[in-house]
Image: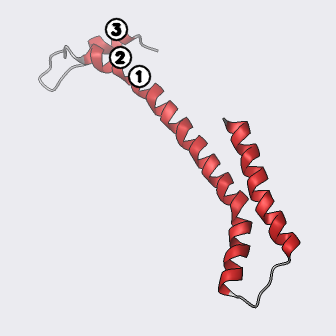
């Protein structure tokens, strides 16, 4: 594996001369990789939180919308309450665990 100085010295521009910015360019790459790693981790975290939110509340909203679209279709009150509190409880647990 080559050191940064060796890589910087071996950089030749299109005119056949060594570029004075080659060391700067190599120094920026690790900082960009760290930034990219942080952004990737943040995107995964947001994806997990949004996915869990949707999974927690999907049963409740499905039953709620079904009741609005089909007035003759009645969901038992107990099942409606279970879906309602399931959304709250799971989302609160997720929020406490992640934050």
Q: Position of residue 79 (x, y in %)?
A: 85, 71
Q: In what element is the residue under mark 2?
A: helix
Q: Nearer the viewer, residue 33 or 78?
A: 78
Q: Give the quarter of the image for residue 64.
A: bottom right
Of all residues shown, which one is farthest toward the right? 78
Q: Which mark is residue 27?
A: 2
Q: Residue at x 53, y 42 (%)?
A: 43
Q: In the displayed structure, would residue 46 be above or below residue 25?
A: below
Q: Residue at x 34, y 10 (%)?
A: 6
Q: Which mark is residue 5?
A: 3
Are dots 1 and 2 in contact, CB under 8 Å? yes
Query: What's the distance in space between the residues labelled 1 and 3, CA to CA?
Result: 17 Å
Reading the chain from its start, which is encountered first: label 1 or label 3?
3
Q: Which mark is residue 31?
A: 1
Q: Position of residue 81 (x, y in %)?
A: 82, 66
Picture colour scheme: secondary structure
């Amino acid at each position: 594996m080559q050191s940064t100085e060796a890589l910087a010295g071996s950089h030749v521009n299109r005119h056949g001369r060594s570029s004075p910015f080659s060391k700067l360019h190599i120094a920026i790459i690790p900082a960009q990789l760290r930034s990219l790693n942080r952004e990737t981790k943040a995107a995964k975290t947001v994806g997990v939180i949004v996915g869990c939110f949707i999974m927690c509340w999907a049963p409740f909203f499905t039953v709620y919308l079904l009741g609005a679209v089909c007035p003759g279709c009645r969901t038992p009150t107990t099942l409606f309450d279970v879906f309602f509190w399931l959304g709250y409880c799971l989302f609160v647990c997720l929020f406490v665990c992640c934050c």
